Image (cartoon, coloured by chain):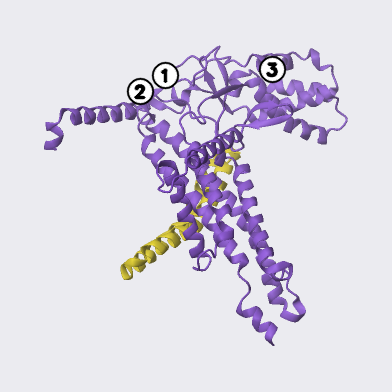
Chain colours: A purple, B yellow
Amino acid sequence: MGKLLSSPKLLVIAIAAVAALLVSVAGGALGASFGLGFLGGPIPFISIPAERVAFIGSYQLLNSTVMFWFGGLILLFIAWRAGRNVKDVPSGWQNLMEMIYEFFSNTVDGVAGGRPKAGRRFLALVTTIFLVVMIINWVGILPGVGSVGRIESIEEWVHHHVEKFEAEVEDAHPAYTHEQVEAAALVHLLEEHGEDTFVAFDGIFVPLGQGEQARVPLNKIISFTETDLHEIETAIERGDDLSHVEALENIHHDIEAGVVKSEFTYDEGGSNEKDYNFTGQTAGLLVPYLRGASTDINTTLAIAIIAMFTVQFWGFRALGVRGYGGKFLVNPITKGPIATFVGVLEAFGELTRTISFTFRLFGNMFAGEILLIAMAFLLPLVGIIPFMGLELFVGVIQAYIFAMLTLVFGVMAVASHGDHDSHAEDH
Amino acid sequence: MDAEAVKPLAAAIAIGVGALGPALGIGLLAGKAMEALGRNPEATGPVQQNMILALAFAEAIAIYALVVAIIILFV
């Protein structure tokens, strides 16, 4: 303490840190219950599937794909920097890459039996998985990922969500015309999603300082009543000309406008209820341009399939089709029914390993993303910093686990049945 | 109770109960690893490596529960 007081620089830093903490506590969700909360925004809509950002021809470019390419570019850059000027005594990037290579070279040999070069065949894939997964985990928590994007308007949202209902209506009433199907699907959509909330955007930024109150339910954006919906439904059933139904026309008009129609108050706050007036502001959802590749289940599934497919390949190459296939398909007459059942279980085990690979990485990284979002709303500005560090750590650990499990499964696949088999052949 | 009201409750139960087993497992694993380190401090490297690997297996089960909870909440 004495040292802190004697050095003015440290003192200023300490005061600044405490001030930042106080500001963040007051500005976040805790401060919101005392009527402050000037830094809090509405919690963004959390989407499990990755979002589209652009179409290239008919190809849908997902935001997680962009980040995967970015991670790949970084890896290429590091590899280029490391291999550009190779020296006998390594330094800098070359040193780093050699360190990683050496570590994995020793690890695969250790796991594969301890003899030098015993794990040579596993080295390439295991190291690649580690590097790729680590880099995509790390670039996924860069600032701006998941927070910069475009606003999906109500019109687009309705367009996306109505498709599901249209298919349902078509199945139930195959005789309906196209207009009737559309109208019926819209009615179902409004009935089911009327309470869904959207963010009222003031310009291009997520509104700050209004917290959860800036979330507008759909029925305040599209004004409709039960009787309106009922009227449309009876019109559809009677087979009326739908272009003359006024309620439907109004709904279509509101969807196109996509602005907050009527005033509403957020009724969960209790004492801190302020009436914000959002009337006339554009409502929508944020669609981020970038999203960490490992928070998309397709990425993790792809890496898992590559890993498990290669494991099978190693097994077949080391033991042959009869040797490796014999682990899964066992003759019930010569070896007994229990061995057959065990073989089937083993085959299912390969499948569940793929699934658990997928969900382990996806779950960890997606949960981390949600954790960061939650901290950004509880303690804006400073709350996120320690958790960023945690996410960096989790990113490495998950990459290491992915790589090591691939290695262990590979070693298990190339190991022959050993004693059990050779005994059987002897007798 | 309607479906919307049950959702948060269901998610909370899913992750709460789902985390119990992995928590016990991780505790046991780490405890045994510490014991092993106490007996044989030279083996820190391999023990740590294998412990982290085994921890990942235990943790994965909690992650499944988490995925289920997330799906209940947001889908």
Q: Amino acid at mark 1?
A: Lys
> Furthest residue to the front?
A88
> Furthest residue to the bottom?
A427
| Position of residue A46 measured from the top left corner of the image (x, y, whole percent) | 55, 34
Residue appearing at x 78%, y 24% in the figure: A182
Q: Secondary structure at mark 2?
A: loop
Q: Which residue is mark 3?
A: A251
- Position of residue A92 relative to residue B55, above or below, is above
Q: CA distance from mark 1 to mark 3?
A: 29 Å
Counting residues from the N terminus, which is met first, the one under dot 2 or under dot 1? 2
Indicate the quadrant where residue A295 lies.
Answer: top right
Pick the residue in front: A425 or A6.
A425
Q: Amino acid at mark 3?
A: Ile
- Position of residue A317 relative to residue A36, above or below, is below
Q: Which residue is mark 2?
A: A35
Tell me whether circle 2 and circle 1 mark residues in contact (CB < 8 Å): yes
Q: CA distance from mark 2 to mark 1?
A: 9 Å
Pick the residue in front: A12 or A315.
A315
Indicate the quadrant where residue A293 lies.
Answer: top right
* Chain letter belonging to callout 1: A
Badge 1 local density, few (<14 within 10 Å), some, or many (20+)? few
Badge 3 local density, few (<14 within 10 Å), some, or many (20+)? many
Q: CA distance from mark 3 to mark 2?
A: 36 Å
Q: Which residue is mark 1?
A: A274
